[in-house]
Image: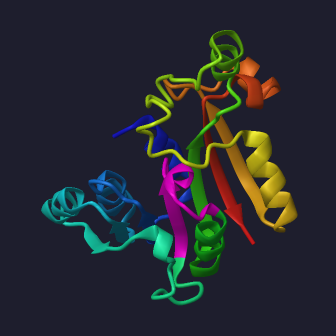
Amino acid sequence: MRSELQLIQQWIHTGASVLDLGCGDGTLLAHLIATRNVLGYGLEINHDKIVECLNKGVNVIQQDLDQGLANIGNQSFDVVVMTQALQAVTYPEMVLDDMLRVGKECIVTFPNFGHWRNRLYLGLLGRMPMSRAIPYNWYDTPNIHLCTFRDFEAFCHKRDIRILHRTVVDMEYENGTAMRILPNLFGETAIYHIAR
């Protein structure tokens, strides 16, 4: 299991109901079901990933996040999770609003476009940055709404979203002193635990 997922699980209590948006192959849910006895459901659009979820015994629904979550009632889940997908949805504001409507708490992760390597790449080469966190060319990237930690926190402040916890890590999922002091410059991945 990716270390990012290990960090996420610290904010999910035993027996919680969990909705995983863009759940991929179901790795997080399968782990949470096995170790935390959660009641979990995933939403995924990719047919092959849905098959992998089913093979792992994960409940999954084929759904496009850009179509919203109108089919899910208010406060239906204890925790709604979306890892490394916020930057790839067409309407991130709508998806975040829906997450906070259907979940009592939410966990969101995304790559930090403000990382110093991205700034240096753009500044020196004059080209859109590519890195381990953002490994795509500008023309083939699924990432259409890149943001920085400051952007996300300003969004949360504007929308009266409470940040319960924030973890800033590098690509090895370590959190060093530089990242704690200047997270927007040195953090590569953001992991936010939020609520209304």
**29 sits to left or right of 167:** left
Does residue 191 sit above or below 127 in this rendering?
Answer: below
What residue is drawn where x is 61% and y is 61%?
A: 92
Q: Is residue 157 visible?
A: yes
**190 sits to left or right of 63:** right
**64 sits to left or right of 56:** right
Residue 32, percent from left and from top: 37, 58
What residue is drawn where x is 68% and y is 43%?
A: 147
Does residue 27 sit above or below 196 in this rendering?
Answer: above
Residue 179, percent from left and from top: 72, 25
Q: Which region shows up in magenta?
A: 78-92
Give the camera-side residue of 45 and 17. 45
Give the camera-side residue of 86 and 179. 86
Q: Is residue 16 visible?
A: no
Q: Which of the 4 image quadrants contains residue 57? A: bottom left
Residue furthest to the top: 124
Q: Quadrant of the C terminus?
A: bottom right
Q: Quadrant of the N terminus?
A: top left
